[in-house]
Image (spheres, rainbow, N blue to C red):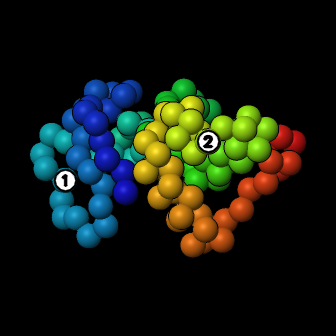
Amino acid sequence: MSTPHGPCARCGRPMVRQRAGDGAVPAGTVRHHGRGLCGTCRTHAARHGELADYQRSTRPIADTLAEHAVLRTFGGLEHDQVAARLGIKPASLQRQLDRARTRNTRITCEEHTR
């Protein structure tokens, strides 16, 4: 689920959360569609190759797993140190690792360094 943190980063219009089953959008607001953009601006940015200019607010689990594997294997860092390096709390890192284990998602160091 996407969560806005203020107005659209491109057009400045106020945004509301996007959730399945929501009714009409309140007057004067637009729905959030990721990367801090409303739907219109996200579509425009994607079509014009500008989407990478807007930072993601979430981290793909594959990226977390890959960096975790590299830091643990090659960096010799402990769990808390890896979490600090990734900029997240150790408990959040553990939840992501548990979630990946449940989904049977695996990324090896070799896959990440190619």
Q: Is residue 100 visible?
A: yes
Q: Nearer the viewer, residue 108 or 17?
A: 108
Structural crowding at the residue carrying mark 1, measured as other residues with C-alpha within 10 Å and reported as few (<14), some (14–19) or many (≥20)? few
x and y, in percent, of residue 96 in the image: 52, 56
Task: Give the vertical position of 75 relative to 102 (above or below).
Answer: above
In the image, is 100 to the left or to the right of 34? right
Q: In what element is the residue under mark 2?
A: loop
The residue positioned 43% from the left and 42% from the top of the image is: 89
Q: How many marks?
A: 2
The front one of 87 and 45 is 87
Query: Which quarter of the rendered picture does the N terminus lie within?
Result: bottom left
Tag 2 residue:
78
Residue 24 in percent (x, y) is at 18, 59
Q: Residue furthest left?
A: 27
Question: In the shown orientation, is residue 78 left or right of residue 29?
Answer: right
Rendered image quadrant of residue 19 = bottom left
Q: Residues within 10 Å of mark 2 (few under 14, many from 20)?
A: few
Q: Is residue 64 left or right of residue 36?
A: right
Q: Quadrant of residue 7?
A: top left
> Is residue 112 positioned above or below 87 on the image?
below
Residue at image location 50% in from the left, 55% down from the top: 94
Where the C terminus falls, by quadrant? top right
Going from N to C along the chain, the mark reached first, 2 or 1, is 1
Amino acid carrying label 1: it is Val
Which residue corresponds to mark 1? 25
Real-space Cα distance between discs 2 and 1?
46 Å
